[in-house]
Image: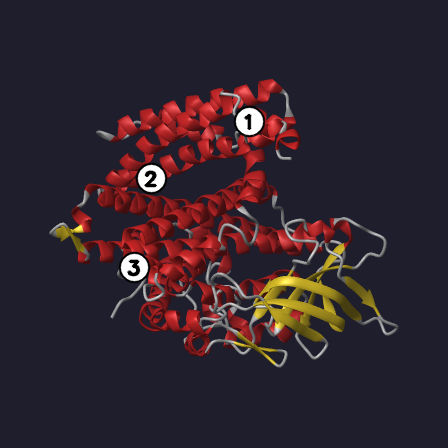
Amino acid sequence: MPNFFTENSDIQFHFNRIDIKEVVDIAEDNYEQAKEFNFAPHNYEDAKENYYKVLEIIGDISGNYINERSSGVDEEGAHFVDGKVIYASGTLENLKRLSQADLMGMILPRRFGGLNFPFTMYMIGIEMVSRADASLMNIFGLQDIGDTINKFGTEEQREKYLPKFCTGEHTGAMALTEPDAGSDLQAVKIHAYQDENGQWRLRGMKRFITNGNGDVLLVLARSEPGTKDGRGLSMFACHADSTVKVRRIENKLGIHGSPTCELQFNDTPCELVGQRKLGLIKYVIDLMFRARMGVSAQALGVSQAAYEEALKYAKEREQFGKPIYDIPVVTNMLIDMRVSLETCRSLFYNAAQCVDLKEKIDEKINKLKAKGEPFTEENKKLKELTKLANFLTPLSKYTITEASNKITYDSLQIHGGTGYMKEFKVERLARDARITNIYEGTSQLQIVAAIGGVINDILKDHFAQKAAKEYKGALQRLNNYLKEIRVIFEDSLHYVIEKKDSTFQDVAAKDLVELYSYLYIGYLVLEEAEEDPRKVFIANRYIINSLSNAQKNAASIKNELFNDLLHADKILV
């Protein structure tokens, strides 16, 4: 009976070393909630024990139920019949089982029936569900809709919407994208207006909406007539009543169990969430932080599944009188897959803790403000955490989703011709992975989001501190390699800045971001190698490869390869 939590040694490693005491202290009101809820933790150790038990349940459900139905869900897919979206039968069964286990409100407050889980622990759950069925994550992972209402809505809105999220009676969707407003959400046109009775209503179209058939929709709409940018957008919540028409669901390459809908709002009654004009610049940005991390967890789960399939097949498949596992070129692929998977997980859970703490410090500041108490130190900490989260979130999505595409591709390659056949799971995994570096912001947009932090060298002090440390034994050699990468990065950055050419900076951005990622991830895995001998090989392989890749990145920047890009308008004709 597989358990995707207890049997995954790397997830166990990260769970045991994750330190979110400050997050939990704030989330549990310094454990005052235990006085009101008998199942709330009394201290941090109690909390982590509770998290372990719940994640063990998710690991069991994922490994023994969701995973077993995933092929059937992919084959059946979501249906569109007489204007209604119908989930695949396996999806319905999975959602029922998750609801029965009280897991549909993991991150929502206990007073509404939720589990009050920290974001980091929720992400572990998301990874496991995604490993079992990536398409189910796109329904299970939309608990963030409820979280947004909880953060920015009124108490009346919380009481109206959150209890049914927690029971699983309602699922949600974030309706952001439009035909002419994909990544550029400032171009949103759907109209929000107040009728003669002051009731807000929505009129217009949304497209490519994940789980657009959800019961509760968070809609980004233009509330300020005459505006054309993000300052005219507000956030609205509505029920998917008869005024919301699902025009179609998309026929997609992968994640077939997740319906992607085109929606038409016909004077739909809705409620303003938070303040007018802050829909994009505050609420969607907060929501996108979590959505991009959720997709990173999804990609990580798919990567784990693909690696397991490749390893199993390589040990079973014999060619030339021996398992292909023993053929060095295949073995090397498997090793690279494992190193990529584990380093991505190191980056991801480090980033998740940063986002978690950022959100909780923000929550603490709001509580201090309400009490009229000072919050200078907390505000200073929030600024630093926000700066770091603004960098690590796009870096994680870029790195992990690109790696997932490579891992699933290599897994299919190891399977050979059989992997191309639908009878083999890896064929579905390769299709499911493909969307991860596209939706919630393409890889190219993640580079754009991350480059500012790289240009400003926001981790300069962090890297200097790590470089000055003496690592034990042979690990110091790896520190020296990271110092070399640091020199390569500084030299490359200086080269780009000295050109004083913003266009050149834009086209060099990918290489600069990758150079910075080698340093950040490299020091993460080096620290892990000091704690656990199992991680020494991972750190060694990753850092040595990174030094080689860093030299390639620097060469790309300096050899004027980008000159063609600077004159693309004359070449691409």
- Mark toward the viewer: 1 or 3: 3
User: Can you identify the residue that label 1 sits on?
Assistant: 562
Amino acid under disc 3? Thr
| Cα distance in 3D space between marks 1 and 3 | 40 Å
User: Can you identify the residue that label 3 sits on?
Assistant: 418
Query: Which structural element holds mark 1?
Result: loop
Pointer 1 or 3: first along the chain: 3
Residue 90, horizontal then vertical, whole percent: 42, 76
Amino acid under disc 1? Phe
Q: Nearer the viewer, residue 22 or 554?
A: 554
Q: Which color scheme does this rendered protein use?
A: secondary structure
| Cα distance in 3D space between marks 3 and 2 | 35 Å
Location of the N terminus by quadrant is bottom left
In the rendered image of this protein, does residue 504 appear above or below residue 297? above
* Few, some or many residues within 10 Å of mark 1 (<14, 14–19, 20+): some
Amino acid under disc 2? Val
Residue 233, horizontal then vertical, whole percent: 75, 55
Res. 220 mark: none
Q: Residue at x 31, y 31 (%)?
A: 544
Res. 525 mark: 2
- Mark toward the viewer: 3 or 2: 3
In the image: residue 299, left or right of residue 4: right
Residue 340, horizontal then vertical, whole percent: 35, 44
Pointer 1 or 2: first along the chain: 2
In the rendered image of this protein, does residue 87 appear above or below residue 339? below
Pointer 3 or 2: first along the chain: 3
Location of the C terminus by quadrant is top right
In the image: residue 310, left or right of residue 175: left
